[in-house]
C-alpha cells in the first residue's frame, strides 16, 4: 500500500510541477502581450 501511495505522490508532484510551469509560461506571454508593439519593435 505504501508503494502505491508514494507512486501517487510522485504523480501529483510532477502534475503540480507541470501546472506551475504552464502558469509561468502563461504569465510571461501575458506580460509580453501587455508591453505591446514597442517591445516587438526592439526584437
Image (cartoon, rainbow, N blue to C red):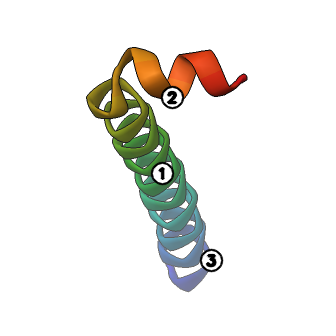
Labelled disc at residue 39: 2
Q: Earlier in the sequence, mark 2 or mark 1?
A: 1
Q: Residues within 10 Å of mark 3 (few under 14, many from 20)?
A: few
Snapshot quadrant of residue 6: bottom right
Q: Position of residue 13 (x, y in %)?
A: 51, 67
Q: Residue furthest right?
A: 43
Q: Residues within 10 Å of mark 2 (few under 14, many from 20)?
A: few
Q: Secondary structure at mark 3?
A: helix
Q: Which residue is mark 1?
A: 15
Who is closer to the viewer here, 23 or 36?
Answer: 36
Q: Position of residue 42 (x, y in %)?
A: 65, 27
Q: Which residue is mark 3?
A: 3
Q: Secondary structure at mark 1?
A: helix
Mark 3–mark 1 CB contact (< 8 Å): no
Q: Residue at x 55, y 18 (%)?
A: 40
Q: Is residue 5 above or below residue 7?
A: below
Q: Is residue 42 above or below residue 24?
A: above
Q: Residue at x 41, y 15 (%)?
A: 37
Q: Earlier in the sequence, mark 3 or mark 2?
A: 3
Who is closer to the viewer here, 31 or 24?
Answer: 31
Q: Is residue 26 above or below residue 3?
A: above
Q: Residue furthest bottom?
A: 2
Q: Residue at x 27, y 31 (%)?
A: 34
Q: State how far apart marks 3 and 1 are (Cα).
A: 18 Å
Amino acid at each position: 500500500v505504501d508503494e502505491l501511495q508514494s507512486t501517487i505522490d510522485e504523480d501529483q508532484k510532477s502534475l503540480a510541477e507541470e501546472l506551475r510551469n504552464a502558469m509561468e509560461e502563461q504569465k510571461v506571454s501575458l506580460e509580453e502581450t501587455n508591453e505591446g508593439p514597442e517591445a516587438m519593435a526592439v526584437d
